[in-house]
Each structure stands twice: as C-alpha cells, then as structure tokens.
Amino acid sequence: MASVRANMAGVVARVLVQPGDTVTAGQEVVIIESMKMEIPVEAEVGGKVTAVVAAAGAFVNEGDPLLELADS
Amino acid sequence: MSVHEEARARAETARKGGAPRYHEQAKGRGKLFCRQRIALLCDPDSFVEDGLLANALAADLPADGVVTGLGRVGGRPVAIMANDSTVKAGSWGTRTVEKILRVQETALRLRVPLVYLVDSAGARITDQVEMFPGRRHAGHIFFNQTRLSGLVPQVCVLLGPSAAGGAYIPAFCDVVIMVEGNASMYLGSPRMAEMVIGERVSLEEMGGARMHCTVSGCGDLLAKDEGEALALCRCYLGYLPGSCGELPPVTDARPPSPKRPVEAIVPENQNAPFDMNELLGALFDDVFPLKPLYAGEVITAFARLDGHPVGIVANQPRVKGGVLFVDSADKAARFIWLCDAFHLPLIFLADVPGFMIGTAVERAGIIRHGAKMIAAVSEASVPKLCVVVRKAYGAGLYAMSGPGFEPDCTLALPTASIAVMGPEAAVNAVYANKIAELPEGERAKFVAERRAEYGADIDLYRLASELVVDAVVPGDALREELVARLDLYAGREQPCARKKHAVHPV
C-alpha cells in the first residue's frame, strides 16, 4: 500500500485516474490548482489505484493523501 | 642508508597512509584513498604537498590523517585539504588542525580556491586539550572559513562522514558535493540521538547525502560515486574566478541547438505548467544546476552565455507552479550572494505567481525568508538582467529583480504579464462584495467583464508604453538580445581587492 500525496496546498482540480487503473512511477495522476496555477502531482511509485481519497473540488494541505495505491 | 635514502623512505611510509586493512575496508565501500582523490581532482602531476611528515615520529599517524597542499585544476592553482580516513578514521589531532589552518592561510595569502575533501570522524577526544579549545585549534578552522568566504571559492566534496564539529566544514563552504551512500553530516550520531531523545533512526535518514540534498538543503549536488563528485568539483570551479580579485574565466561560445524554438517552449496560457529547463537549454551554452533536488520551484544554476559565466535564477512552473516558498527564497538568496561575491552576472527568468500564502508558510517565516531573497537581489552589484517570461505577480516581481531593483534591463517576452496579482484573484479581491450582491445569473458575465478590464489595464504594451519594461523581445530573439546586452553591461563589474561580502550560510 502506498499513497499519492499532495505536493502543495490547494484544490484538487482533476483526478486523472480512477480505481482499478494501473499507474507507473512518475505518471501524472492528479492536478491540483493553487495560486491560480495547475500543479501536476506524480505517483512516486507504481501500483493499482484502489481509492480516490480527495475528489475534484476538495481542499487539500501539503502531504494530504489523494489516492491510495496497492502493489500491482 | 644515506640521509637522502632515509628522507625518501620516510616520505614513502607517510604516503601510504594507514594500515592495509583500513584501505581494504574503504575500498569495500567504494571509497578511494585520499591521494587518489587528489590525483583525480587535480591536473596530472600538479600537486605539491606540505606537512607530509606531520607526526612522523608516531608510528600510526602518517601525515596526521590529513593531506594538504596546492595543485592545479583546469590549469589554475587551488589549495586542497583531504582527510585520510585510513588514519584513525580521518580524525583530527593537534597537527591535523594545524595543517588545515595552514592550508587555509595559504589560500588566503595566494588568493586561490580551497577544496576540502572531507571524510572524517571528527575530533580525537583523547587529544582534545591540544586541538579543541585554543587559539589555533579546531574552532579557528571555522573562523578562517568565514574570513575566506566571498574572498576565494570554497568547495566541500563530502566523501564520508563529517560528524559533530566536523560537520561545520561543509556548512561554511559555498557548495557541498555529496557522494550518495557514503557522505553524511550530522551533529549527534544516531546512537547519541537514541540515548538523549529516544529516537531510533538510521544514519542515512538522519544525515545521509540524499536527505541533505533533498530535504535540509545542506547539500548542493548528489553524486553517484567519488569519480562523479570530483568531476563535478572541477566543473563547478570552471565557472568561477580564483578569487574576488579576478573576473570569471571566459571560454569559447557554444550556441545551443534546442529541439524546439523558444516560441514553442513557452505556453501562452499563464496557468499551464512547462519545463523551465527546456527554455534554459535553448538560451545558454551550458547549464550547471546547483541544488537541483532541493526546492525545485526555483532553479539556481551556473551557465555560460556566449562563453561568459553567468548565474541563473529561474522560476520552475513545473514544480509547485513556480510559487516561491521558504526554502526556495533561502536557496535563491544564497545563490545570489555566491554569484555576486565572484562577479557572475545574474540573469533572472521570471514566471512566478508570487510567494505562497497560508498558515504553514507564515509560521515558517515566509516574510523574513522572502525579505532575505529580496535583500540579496537589492545588494547584488553584478550586472542584473531581468527577463519576464510569463507572469510576474506581487512580491514575485520584486524577488526576481523587477524594475524597482535596478536591473540593467527588464526584458519581457510577448507572453509576459506583470501585476500585483493575476486577473482571477484581482477581480475576486476588488469586487467580492459586489459579486455576492448580484443575482446568481448575472455573476459570470460581471466577472468576465471585470477580468477583461483588468487584462486591458495590465496589457503588456501599456506597460511598455509606461516604460515599465525596457523592451518586448520575441522568444526566438531572446538569446541574441541577452548576449548583446551582457557584453555591453560587462564594464559594470570590476575585480576587487577586498571581498564584497561572505557567501552567508543561511
């Protein structure tokens, strides 16, 4: 199990994956909007998306979990 | 044995360093003997040593655990200190400290860079009265480092531990190059931390090279092995003069051959991320980033423009939107002091939404760290060229050497946008009450109209007409414009007999 975490405080603008998708390390998986900028969030490790913790529109702080991943 | 043979024999013994088993141990960890390190750092056969016979009468302390002397790097003289980890783990005794002090004084006298090849367990506690508290003891090393700072470049290549007091040698250098897996830097060891505060932590987590190059900011460059670390050191010195009494060395121009033109690299949509490194690659002959793994929202790099060394401060929209944070302001401030001390002109490439807001950064002191960066920008007397690539909002404009900070020029790409804040935030700030009073159905139209008005108010050609920017330069003409201007501004900077200021530890 691993989490993809917010790299900056802001609002989740778009979630680019859904549960069941397989992601690779370095893949952009979420876009956060903060300070009027689109901030891409990459998965640090690969895995299968098991849950979207923060959906579009949610406010997040730096370090908050956005997605949960399971080893694929 | 003749007296000459004795001299040769004693020197040969001292040059061998510690017992063979310590050489084997070091080799097993991917570590080179300190004399091999010096050979890799210096031009062939250029090293001349002082104090080889320090402590020669003690059987087990060849050179007292440190090699000091002068060599050449890229044809220019440098002073070198190299700990010998095969001799009592590179720890410091009385003569070790005296040798380090003397090589510092040599660098001071000759005005040459000083490279510290650090691999040391710290003080020999058994010898403390002779090496710790006094006038010419360990503390004086750091005093000398501070006096040398800004006068000559000081580089630390960290190849093993630098523990407790020893950890301050890297801390007072201008740049610290760390070998992943072997370099470490800490005040108290994991064992001490467990005894004192009950913390169980590995050395790598607490003071390893990767941690320092990504989290603490104590490290500047992470090298995969010693060969790479020493090559980075040579490359770094190639951008700098030998001291503040010289100007940086000029080399042949090597125009870049970018995959895409500048006009295709920079998106017009202010909010869309792009990779600033691609733009740097299209503008400069070469780019040598410092602290690339730390506070990546701002890029600090040495570079050459038409063969002339310069310092780049560029926002990176690809990381955290290019917003300035505590660590990025800190990183930029120190880099600006470094460039200013050694006469590297500064080129600012602004694409910055401003400084970060919110409780977390206020508690971390973002205002004073931002002020530190803006103070460094203000103080810098080297040529300063401000290029507004896209947005430069709020105090971000000031931190990136906007017009109020007396840059030699403020150039704008046609994609530039300069304002207190972006249109969306501005309309919300000015008309929040009015928007709330409007019926739901009328709000979108009202907001769109106000944004259009705001956009017209900060239109780039209005700013050019008001002389806020000195020129609007199409992307593909930017390199030539920078080359021409840098050449014309060169007279602003002269070598100085006295240092301008230290490269302050921040």
Image (spheres, coloured by chain):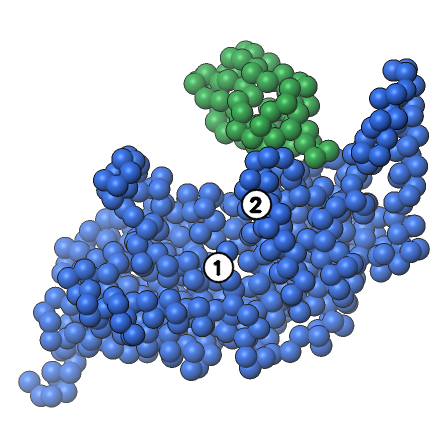
Chain colours: A green, B blue
The three-letter code of the residue at mark 1 reads Pro
Is disc 2 placed on a helix, strand or loop?
Answer: loop
**In x, y percent, where is residue B16?**
19, 67
The residue shown at (42%, 58%) is B171
In the image, taking residue B218 as reference, residue B309 lies left or right, namely: right
| Whether residue B265 can be seen here | no
How many residues crowd around disc 1 within 10 Å: few (fewer than 14), some, or many (20 or more)? some
Tag 1 subunit:
B
Quadrant housing residue B316: top right
| Whether residue B374 can be seen here | yes
Quadrant housing residue B365: top right
The residue shown at (12%, 66%) is B60
The residue shown at (63%, 16%) is A55
Q: Which residue is mark 2?
A: B365
**In x, y percent, where is residue B374?**
65, 56
* Residue that protrudes farthest toward the bottom in the picture: B3
Q: Which mark is residue B505?
A: 1
The three-letter code of the residue at mark 2 reads Gly
The Cα–Cα distance between marks 1 and 2, rounded to whole angstroms, is 17 Å
Q: Is residue B500 above or below residue A64?
A: below
